[in-house]
Every structure is written in C-alpha cells, then in structure tokens.
Amino acid sequence: MESTREESFVASSWAVVVVLGVIVVVGASVQRLAGIGFALVAVPALVMLLGPAEGVVLANCAAAVISAAGLADTWRQVRLAAMIPLVVAASCTVPAGAWVATRLPELVLLAGTGLLVSVAAMLVMWGARVPALRGATGAVAAGAASGFMNSSAGVGGPVVSLYAVNVGWTVREFVPNAQFYGLVVNALSVAAKGLPQLTTPVWLLIAAAIAAGLVIGQALAQRVPERPARLIVLLLALTGGLTTLGKGLWSL
C-alpha cells in the first residue's frame, strides 16, 4: 500500500514537471513571436501549478533569460536615455512588490495575480490612451507601476507596452527596449526574492524548454503576421488571467 502511494506521488510529480515544461515552451514561443507575452501567458498557469510565490519568481527568471536572448541581436537599438527613467523608477518599487508577495495570503495573491493579468491584457488590447503616461513623468509612473507589478505578480510588461503606445513608439522601436527593460527589471525582481526552490533536473528542463520555445517562436515569426500574433497572445493571457482570478475567488 505504501509503495503504491509513493509510485502515485512520483507519477504526479513527473506530470507536474512535464506540464511545467510545456508552459515554458509556449510562453517562450509567444514572447519570441510577438515581442511580449511570456509572463502574460505563463504566469496564470505557473501560479496555479507552483503557487503564487514560486510561480511568479520562476516567471521572472525565465523572462529575464528570454529577454537576454532577444537582446543578443537588438541591443544596438536600445534607447538608453529613454529607458533610464523607467528602469530607475522600477528599481525603487521592486522591493515593495516583493514585500507584498511575501506578506499576503496565497489565495489573495492568486486572485490578485489573475486580476492584474486580466486588466493588463484588456488595456493593451484596447490600446488605452493615458495622458499621464507621456514624457518624463509618464516614464517614471510607468516604471514605478511596472516594477511593483513585475515583482509582486510577474506582469510588469503591459504597463511598459501602454507607455510605448502613448509616446508613439513603433513595434520595431518597442521590442528591443522592452527586452532591455525585461532583462533588468526581472533580474532585480529575482534578486529581491531569491531563486525558486527547484531541483537540478527541473532547472535543466526549463532551460531546454526556453531554448525550444525560442526556436519555435522564431519559426512562427516568419509565417504569422505580427498583429494577429499579438492578439492571440493577449486572448490567451486574458483567458488565463480570468481562470486564475476565478480559482482564487472560488477558493476564498
């Protein structure tokens, strides 16, 4: 009887690991395809699989690696002068987000993460125009909000996307700057919270899943137009966010 329980536990654990790998592959693919989307697509599934704390910090780790990979070809296009206010403001609010993530009950974090993902996805889909998100003041406001959301819920990218829409950046201008921002702010978020507690085989699986996702996303990027791709990503994010929100509220 005891042996059967242990075998069932091991099977369940491996099932979780496989699902985790699939989530990371999908998230990395859509990030490479659309320029945004890893956290929006992956965070709802990761927090339901690993819990809000571990799921969010794993998303931070993966997003930082994916952003670094994207910067390998685009770093010369980064507008450092424009990004400095965003990054500095975010660095000031990342610790607050990390503090909130460690103090709130898990179910509250689950519902809160779902709500933030859902709202962020809808705002980006609508291309919301916010006069406050313009100029130097807008950069600071966007960076501060994004840093807090990234550290607490893993979804800081949509605020930066809204900032880019409101200052008139093209997609070509947005992607390398978003990758630079994603690398710096996710690294800060991981530094504030520490690495997730995963075994070496799981880390290796995640690394392989990121690599596979980048290859798949590159192949899809050559075949799928950018606008439909971004819409698909945001619809997936909205679905995941609403599901996570519903699970959190139901559990509460």
Image (cartoon, helix red, strand yellow):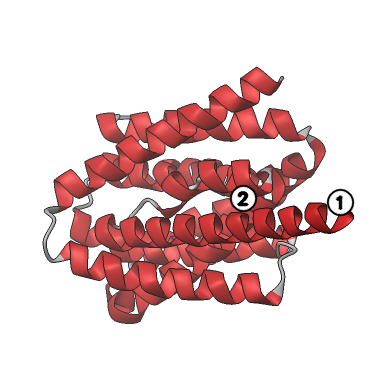
**On screen, 46 above or below 237?**
below
In the rendered image, is residue 235 in sight?
A: yes
Say the numbered circle drawn on residue 58.
none
> Is disc 1 placed on a helix, strand or loop?
loop
* Viewer-closest of 199 and 57: 199
Of the 4 image quadrants, the one containing the C terminus is top right
The answer for how far apart the CA atoms under marks 2 and 1 are is 36 Å
* Viewer-closest of 136 and 12: 12
Residue, disc 1: 1
In percent of width and height, residue 79 lies at 33, 67
Q: Residue at image x 71%, y 45%?
A: 96
In percent of width and height, residue 53 lies at 71, 48
* Viewer-closest of 245 and 80: 245
* Viewer-closest of 156 and 105: 105
Q: Work out whether mark 2 precedes mark 1 in sequence or the reverse, and give the earlier one.
A: 1
In the rendered image, is residue 82 in sight?
A: no
> Is disc 2 placed on a helix, strand or loop?
helix
**On screen, 65 above or below 83?**
below
Q: Quadrant of residue 22?
A: bottom left
In percent of width and height, residue 189 lies at 64, 58
Crowding near pointer 1: few (<14 within 10 Å), some, many (20+)?
few
Residue, disc 2: 56
Inspect the image, locate mark 2, and give the three-letter code of the amino acid beneath it: Val
Crowding near pointer 2: few (<14 within 10 Å), some, many (20+)?
many
**On screen, 76 above or below 146?**
below
